[in-house]
Amino acid sequence: MHKIAILAFDGIPIFELGCALEVFALPRPEFSEWYETRLVSFESAPLKSAACELVGIEHVSQLDEFDTLLIPGWNTDSKKLKMQLAEQIVQFAEQGKRVVSFCSGSFLLAQLGLLNGKKATTHWRFAEKFQQRFPQVKYEGNVLYTQEDNIACSAGSAAGLDLALDLVRQDFGHQAANIVARRLVVSPHRSGGQAQYVETPVPAEHSAFSDTLDWALSRLDKPLVVDDLAGKANMSRRSFDRHFRASIGMSPKAWLNQQRIQMAKRVLENEQINIERLAVKVGFDNAITLRFNFQKYVGISPRQYQMQFSRPVL
């Protein structure tokens, strides 16, 4: 029987913990084989989650008997670790056993050096902090989860379910994963990545440059090109490109395309519209260009996005 340890700690996020317990700890009499899952902690004192006091936690001093360790989150500002906890997790991973993190749990793995040179992810809200603290990790921004060797990380909170279902699929097959997904009333496999949920920032400070961006945002349905933006800002194309990259962190063309995709997402959420009309409405030359950029920045097709996020007609 595959034994899973879910690591509990003070302040553990309750949603991520619930996802882990729902998939791995809930009894599954429909299967002849399933996981044996226990909630464990290296702390002997009573623990509280972000919402309530935790019960049923087993105090442990080592992890030898387990096959998978799941970390449902971690304090993203934590810099200190208890020696016993650190040693046991590193030893567990070095034995080739599976280590899984949900959401901010990747901060703990990165702090222990277990993600050095490996692909990893975390919630998009923590992406900048994660990359600054752990530049040696190959951060993946537009994925729901990563898995390299024996270490897996999910992105945002609900992406833990996507990763959990994939682990069930690996351990017990597609049919088992589909049955668990049906019980959860979720898709057995969700397409796309975190870019579906992230808004592209626009500088807040008022200036001729920000006025140009506002002007561009009000004209996304028109055939704008970068030279139009540079002219509006009274700058040469070269100076505008340089200033834009320094301020926004991307090229003006990429920014324009991303803003058009953001507009397309809003339209798809609220209207029933064919792809050709949508392309014209958000300023792309044709449907092919729209599809290409939508796949590039969102990770799924416009139709897939509409199926997932469109509001029902009342």
Image: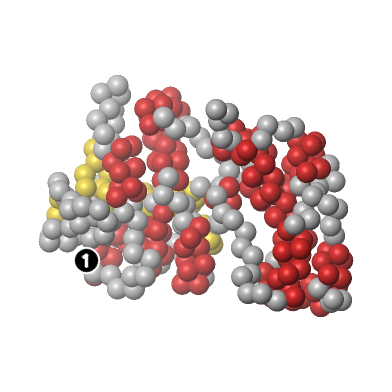
Picture coordinates of residue 73, whole percent (x, y): 35, 56
Picture coordinates of residue 313, whole percent (x, y): 58, 28
- Work out which residue is located at the far front of the displayed protein and give it: 314
Q: Please say which color scheme the image uses.
A: secondary structure
Count of numbered labels shown in the rendering? 1
Looking at this view, name the residue that lies furthest to the left.
Answer: 45
Residue shown at the point (75%, 57%) measured from the top left = 218
The residue that disc 1 covers is 84
Q: Is residue 249 above or below residue 68?
A: below
**What residue do we see at 47% from left, 69% from top?**
129
Crowding around mark 1 (Cα neighbors within 10 Å: few <14, some 14 to 19, many 20+) is few
In the image, taking residue 195 as reference, residue 216 lies left or right, namely right
| Residue 122 at least partly seen | yes
Under circle 1, the secondary element is: helix
Residue 70 can be seen in this image: no
Examine the image and state in which quarter residue 312 appears.
top right
- 227 vs 210, nearest the viewer: 210
Depth check: 164 or 127 in front? 127
User: Above or below — where is 30 with respect to 83?
Assistant: above
Picture quarter with the C terminus: top right
Residue at point 70%, 55% (across, down): 259
Question: Which percent across, then down, holds residue 291?
Answer: 74, 41
Which residue is located at x 46 percent, y 72 percent?
Answer: 133
In the picture shown, does residue 253 fall above or below 207?
A: above
Report the front residue among 100 and 273.
273
Horizontally, residue 25 falls left or right of residue 170, namely left
Give the quarter of the figure containing the N terminus: top left
Q: Amino acid at mark 1?
A: Gln
The x and y percentages for residue 57 are: 16, 50
